[in-house]
Image (cartoon, rainbow, N blue to C red):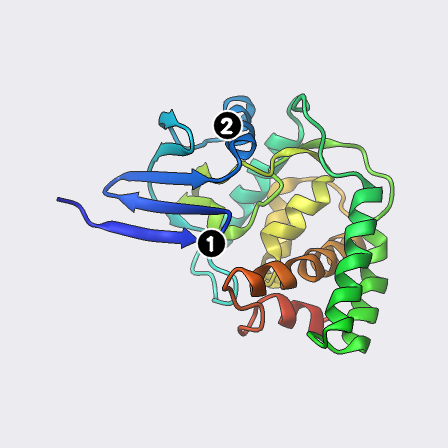
Amino acid sequence: MPEVEVVVAHQERATLRVGDVFLKIDADPGRTDVEVEAMVLAPVPTPEVLWRRTPVLALAALPGTALGRLGEPSTASPAAWAAAGAAARTLHDAPLPPWPGRSREELTSQLDAECAWLVGNGVLPTDLVTRNRQVAEAALRPWTPVFTHGDLQITHVFVDGDEITGVLDWSEAGQGDALFDLATLTLGHEEHLGDVLAGYRADVDLDVIRAWWSLRSLLAVRWLVEHGFDPYAPGCEVDVLRSRL
């Protein structure tokens, strides 16, 4: 019998691997609805949906390995990173999904609340939060919505050699800013931004990419701490924030 591997588990959801099958258990069936529909609509490789019995979604394992992990050097080739950029461009050029994403107003309100919490609870130094809040402002400009993955971190992008074999975890997909996806993909791996943009093949405002690095990290710290993850680990969110000083 194959062993059961806990891939990730916290209060909102859990993912288990049993042989070549991933079982995703989500307390919010709406997120699973989005994930399944987004995978149908997305013009990039995605896992095969084997079955769904709420609250469980069964997906076939993707071939290959993740592009990398936050806080660790990536062993993927520059061509693989470029292929990830090309996949993002294909997604962003696709028709919009029928559901909206977060608005600038929602993001601004959430960012202000998180910054106040980080400072008020002594989680991060005031100067670190203040500087990154200033940097993040560049991301809060008007953008033309595109089909975004919404959580395009490198552990969600699988490659085999230089080819993309699939993209995981579509529960945050929706209409959003293309540069948010690119920033999420390269968070903590700034050295690969050039490779990603070579595959993306479009003019990109690097200041906005950096702004999204700060914004995403500021929004993530409390959630990570409260769900048992470590944003202070080398190369992770707090180090990303420190790099802006």
Q: Is 61 situated left or right of 45 in this image? A: left
User: Can the viewer see residue 161 in this picture?
Assistant: no
The quadrant of the image that shows the C terminus is: bottom right
Residue drawn 42% across and 45% down? 159
Q: Which residue is mark 2?
A: 39
Instruction: Locate residue 58 relative to residue 233 in the image: left or right.
Output: left
Asked which secondary structure carries label 2, the reply is helix
Relative to 44, say whether 111 is above or below: below
Residue shown at the point (77%, 72%) measured from the top left: 119
Secondary structure type for disc 1:
loop
Q: Which mark is residue 10?
A: 1
Specify few, some or many for label 1: CA neighbours under 10 Å numbering under 14, 14-19, or 20 or more: few
Residue 174 picture location, percent across and down: 65, 32
Q: Amino acid at mark 2?
A: Met
Q: Earlier in the sequence, mark 2 or mark 1?
A: 1
Relative image position of residue 116 (x, y in whole percent) = 80, 65
Question: Is the residue 192 above or below the residue 31 in the image?
Answer: below
2 vs 1, front mark: 1
Image coordinates of residue 126 in percent, x first then y, are: 80, 76
Report the side of 98 relative to 82 (left or right): right
Residue type at tag 1: His
Identify which residue, 41 or 53, lies in the foreground: 53
